Amino acid sequence: MTTDARRFRVDEVFDLTARAGLVACGTMLDGTLVNGLSFVDELTGAPIRVIGVDFPTPTTQGTGQHLLVVSREDAALAQPGRVWAGQLVCGS
């Protein structure tokens, strides 16, 4: 785990063909989602390639969840229940 104490739990994953990657809907367990945050899978340490942050929906606004668009190459790590540890990238 990182010293930043920023952790994201994947709650649901959607593969929308019109999107550049998978949409991971999840909850920040520790810390807040900010620009310049990169993630690694807590279990394996593998980097998660975040392509972008998606617009909140009425549902996610009500639940406090966030939508991250991640590379389809990370499909094995973008599974419900996985936890990603975040760290700020230098210069952010």
Image (spheres, helix red, strand yellow):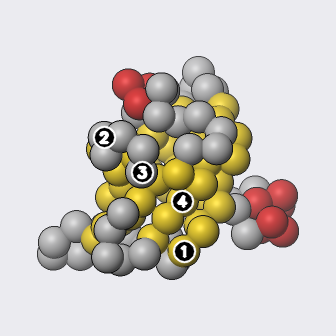
User: In the drawing, what numbered circle is on residue 46?
Assistant: 2
- Mark whose residue sits in front, 4 or 3: 3
Q: What's the residue at 31%, 46% (across, down)?
A: 45
Q: Quadrant of the C terminus?
A: bottom left
Q: 66 and 3: which one is in front?
A: 3
For marks 4 and 3, the one nearer the N-term is: 4
| Gap between marks 1 and 2 measured at Cα | 19 Å
Q: Which residue is mark 1?
A: 30
Q: Quadrant of the N terminus?
A: bottom left
Q: 84 and 88: which one is in front?
A: 84
| Gap between marks 1 and 3 measured at Cα | 13 Å
For marks 1 and 3, the one nearer the N-term is: 1
Q: Amino acid at mark 4?
A: Phe
Q: Amino acid at mark 3?
A: Glu
Q: Image quarter for residue 71?
A: top left
Q: Which residue is mark 4?
A: 8
Q: Which residue is mark 3?
A: 42
Is the residue under label 2 in contact with that under label 4 (CB below 8 Å)?
no
Give above or below for 39 relative to 82: below
For marks 1 and 2, the one nearer the N-term is: 1
- Mark whose residue sits in front, 1 or 3: 3
Q: SS at mark 2?
A: loop
Where residue 16 appears, x then y in whole percent?
Answer: 63, 27
Where residue 82 appears, x then y in whole percent?
Answer: 56, 44
Q: SS at mark 1?
A: strand
Q: Amino acid at mark 1?
A: Asp
For marks 1 and 4, the one nearer the N-term is: 4
Q: SS at mark 4?
A: strand
